[in-house]
Amino acid sequence: MSLPPVIAIDGPTASGKGTVASLVAQQLGFHYLDSGALYRLVALASAKQGVEVKNSTKLGFLVPKLLISFKNGQIFLDGEDVTDAIRTENIGLRASALAIYAEVRSALFDLQHSFRQTPGLVADGRDMASVIFPDAVLKVFLTATAAARAERRYKQLIAKGISARLKDLLQDLQERDARDSSRGTAPLLVADGAKVLEASNLTIDQAVKTVLDWYQSAIA
Ligand code: C5P
């Protein structure tokens, strides 16, 4: 029996891939995996437990013990709603610092695969197409300029009533891009066979439509 189809959407931070991926999933009635949330959950849990971000062995052991659940757009860790707590810049930076370790990445491997269920999955992250779902029927690399992404993140934070400085956000995301792209394990890259979607000047709807059109062509 063949496995359910996967659409893999990778890209740098704040490119809008989460929004696009979840809307594509909604339109197709597919499941959705926000793999970045898993790294953020490890970041939050390890911070709470006082595990140092450099202690890759302890981090690897911690992952299978986490009780993670996704329900109606909310994310729970050990029964606690952490939907907002994992979205801070600090947790994002910590997630990117611990995501360099093979111990952490391999501990999250099976969990990510468990999201692949009928009728299909849209998965977003950094290595969905290259490492986790290399047999994805459609691979998209969704990107935008650093300035456009910083502005997106700025507006998101302000809308949530969280104060932010555009200059700091730009610096943070450039730091995160550099680390995600240069790490030895599963670096952020345009996977073989991936289509690049430059979304700096696209609305969310236009980006969603492009991915849906590409998917229709891919399965035709
Ligand atoms: O996508 P998001 O910004 O939520 O991801 C947080 C961090 O988790 C990223 O900066 C990246 O370092 C890491 N990550 C990863 N592989 C993924 C998803 C996220 O290394 N598939």
Image (tube, grey):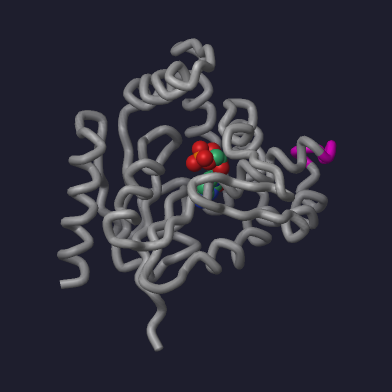
Residue range highlighted in magenta: 49-54
Q: Residue at x 21, y 55 (%)?
A: 212
User: Residue at (42%, 38%) from the top-left corner?
Assistant: 12
Is any atom of residue 182 visible in this view?
Answer: no
Q: Nearer the viewer, residue 77 or 216?
A: 77
214 on left or right of 72: left
Is residue 77 at least partly visible in the picture? yes
| Residue in the image at 53% along x and 67% along y | 113
Q: Position of residue 126 (x, y in %)?
A: 46, 48
Viewed as shown, does residue 195 lie left or right of 63? left
58 on left or right of 138: right
Q: Quadrant of the N terminus?
A: bottom left
Where is residue 109, by image quadrant? bottom right
Q: Position of residue 164 (x, y in %)?
A: 51, 13
Determine the image quadrant of residue 215.
bottom left
* Residue 171, x across and y down, in percent: 50, 19
- As drawn, 93 above or below 81: above
Count of labels in the image: 0
Using the rendered view, name the quadrant where residue 217 is placed: bottom left
Q: Is residue 141 above or below residue 118?
A: above
Of residue 155 and residue 58, the one placed in the foreground of this image is 155
| Quarter of the picture holding the C terminus | bottom left
Q: Main secondary structure of the magenta part?
A: loop
